[in-house]
Image (cartoon, coloured by chain):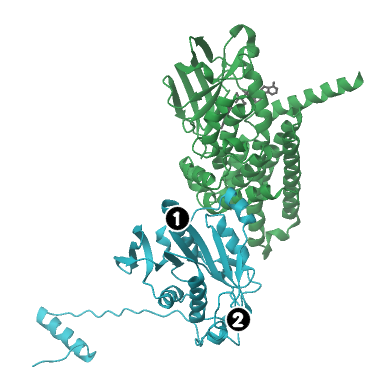
Amino acid sequence: MDIIVCVKQVPGTTEIKMNKETNTIIREGAEAIINPFDEYAIEEGVRIKEKMGGSVTVLSMGIPKVADLLRETIAVGVDNAVLLTDRAFAGADTLATSYALATAIKNMESYDLIVCGKQAIDGDTAQVGPSLAEKLGIPHTTNVKKIEEIKEGYIRCQRMTDDGYETIEMSLPAVITVVKEINEPRLPSLKGKLRAKKTEVKLLTAEDIGADVNLCGLKGSPTQVIETFVPEFEVKAEMFEGSAKEQAKSLADALLSMKYAKRVD
Amino acid sequence: MNYFLTEEQEMIKELAAKIADEKIAPIAIEYDHEGKFPHDIVKYLAQSDLCGVYIEEKYGGLGGGVFEMALVVEELSRACGGIALAFAGTGLGTYPIILFGNEEQKQKYLPDIAAGKHLAAFALTEHDAGSDAAGVRTTATLDGDEYVLNGTKQWITNGGEADVYTVIACTNKDKGARGFSAFIVEKDTPGFTYGKKEDKMGIRASCTRELIFNDCRIPKENLLAREGMGFIVAMKTLDRTRPGVAAQAVGIATGAFNAALKYSREREQFGQPISSFQAVQHMLADMAIQIEASRALVYQTCRHIDSGAKNISKESAMAKVIASDTAMKVTTDAVQIMGGYGYMREYPVEKMMRDAKITQIYEGTNQIQRNVIAQELIKEAAKQKK
Ligand SMILES: Cc1cc2nc3c(=O)[nH]c(=O)nc-3n(C[C@H](O)[C@H](O)[C@H](O)COP(=O)(O)OP(=O)(O)OC[C@H]3O[C@@H](n4cnc5c(N)ncnc54)[C@H](O)[C@@H]3O)c2cc1C
């Protein structure tokens, strides 16, 4: 089973610097780490490989320094590392990112499963995984907390929901995005670190993967960030009192006033 | 300070530091209070390939030596000296096999230890054999193809948790220490049981127990080296593992120092951080000086030993004495700098002070170490005169 794990470099500190003009994150300079959710994706990929054979390739789009982070993943069991790096990719939104990743993946020989973290801790959009699946024309499941079964051409997994989970079957190849409940990422090993030292990260430009530069980077990014904020979910509760009949009337009136119901006489 | 570690040694240190900071530090206080044995941490060490850093490559290790072992012990001890002992105690139990095991014994026992599947222990001490190791009363009598062991070992680190035990027993009562032999005893051998777990002042996440041998029969192939070599096996082993105790002490001291330095910059009294008081500053400076001096001697001693040097007892003893005395002093001062908070069990520093004490006692008390150092000095001087 050949597995691709998409990973992203994110700032390791909480002080994120923004480019005021483009409203994008300035990545140079800040201490960089692998997006924590992607660590679970890597671990899951490596576990599947260990069980079924095959290979795990990490794929990222980013500045050249990201190669160092990708090399570290070799120490936890990844086999190959590929970095898309080119000025043309700079300033990409989720659309342009998934375009670049999908284009690179189409060039790869074969793959059975693509694993992503559920979201990146900097942008928090959770869009790249599903968007990537759409671009590749393959099915996807988000927020996977457990893979129940995986075999040639088939996967059954549990997708975490607010109040439990649902079981989803898909044909492979497919994309899954994983939550942190799925596993406990292993620590790097010394033998792995020694192997990592010798591993070359494959660097690819937009031209190498045959990407249309107009669909890459800032040019290919229609998203304009106007403001970032945490959406508020409010649950309002109103208690009705009185006899059962009075309560029923109050409830009916309330529903009517909120236009959730229509009176039928 | 740049100690010019090799790239591999840097990696070992980094991996051990990661386990210390991410896995041990968060649970150290709990494991201390509850006296919990760190099986989970051993698993992490195994995952990271650290269990066999001092074991030859052909037995599944990394081919390092005493230095690599010490680097791991130091880093782990920064977070918890007791938890580090699961690893260090295994080193102590394994070195007799590394140094004196024959090919079959090495092939049989080292790979599982290198892989972290098995822990080891070393059993010399008895009720009447403390500093005076020649007081061993446990006997081993050859009966056909087996040795029969009888006697009780006391205060054995990893006792009950280890799978492989190196045991020093007497095979010839008339010869004193020259009548001792070293044996490998496996856990679950009939006639081999454990006493209760000792309730200790410090290193409470380490397990210390009696080993009780009652007509315990072991195959005669489990004899290490030859009959009569037991005392030498023990002494040569301890020469190589004392730097491990020293590294444990450096680690504990470093952990306490870091906590005290951080606290001194945060705690304000008289309208200023306590780190602005010269009395505190000088304490911090002295702590740092002593730690760095200890570390330098420990590291250099390790290199001296790993270079294959023949005379290592004096150096090994010196490293152990300076590092353990430093750990006791530094942890006490760390508690002092942190005032009442330092004394509270919710914070890790009082534990470090309790943990530090053992490093002055085991693997030969510091008094005994000074005896060894002085004897060596006098011997050397006598030689020069001739
Ligand atoms: C937590 C713990 C773990 C241990 N783990 C192990 C283990 O894994 N394996 C093992 O074999 N042993 C182990 N030991 C035993 C340890 O090595 C001994 O406790 C140590 O060697 C000291 O022996 P003792 O306790 O009998 O002290 P004693 O020998 O009774 O010493 C008492 C005091 O007298 C002093 N003294 C004794 N003789 C002299 C002398 N000639 N000159 C000057 N001063 C002297 C000592 O320095 C000490 O201060 C452990 C002990 C403890 C407490």
Secondary structure category for the residue under label 2: helix
Q: Nearer the viewer, residue B10 or A212?
A: A212
CA separation in Å, label 2 and label 1: 33 Å
Per the rendering, the mark at residue A88 is: 2
Q: Nearer the viewer, residue B5 or B297?
A: B5
N-terminal of the pair, mark 2 or mark 1, is: 1
Residue type, numbered disc 1: Lys
Secondary structure category for the residue under label 1: helix
Name the subunit of mark 2. Answer: A
Name above or below for residue A263 compared with residue B326: below
Q: Is residue B119 left or right of residue B70?
A: left
Task: Read off the residue under disc 1.
Answer: A49
Residue drawn at (48%, 47%) of the image? B30
Chain A's shade in the image? cyan
* Residue A114 position in % (x across, y down): 44, 66
* Residue A203 position in % (x across, y down): 61, 69
Per the rendering, the mark at residue B285 is: none
Q: Residue furthest top?
A: B174
Q: Nearer the viewer, residue B255 or B178?
A: B178
Residue B382 picture quarter: top right
The answer, for residue B53, to whether it is visible in the render is yes
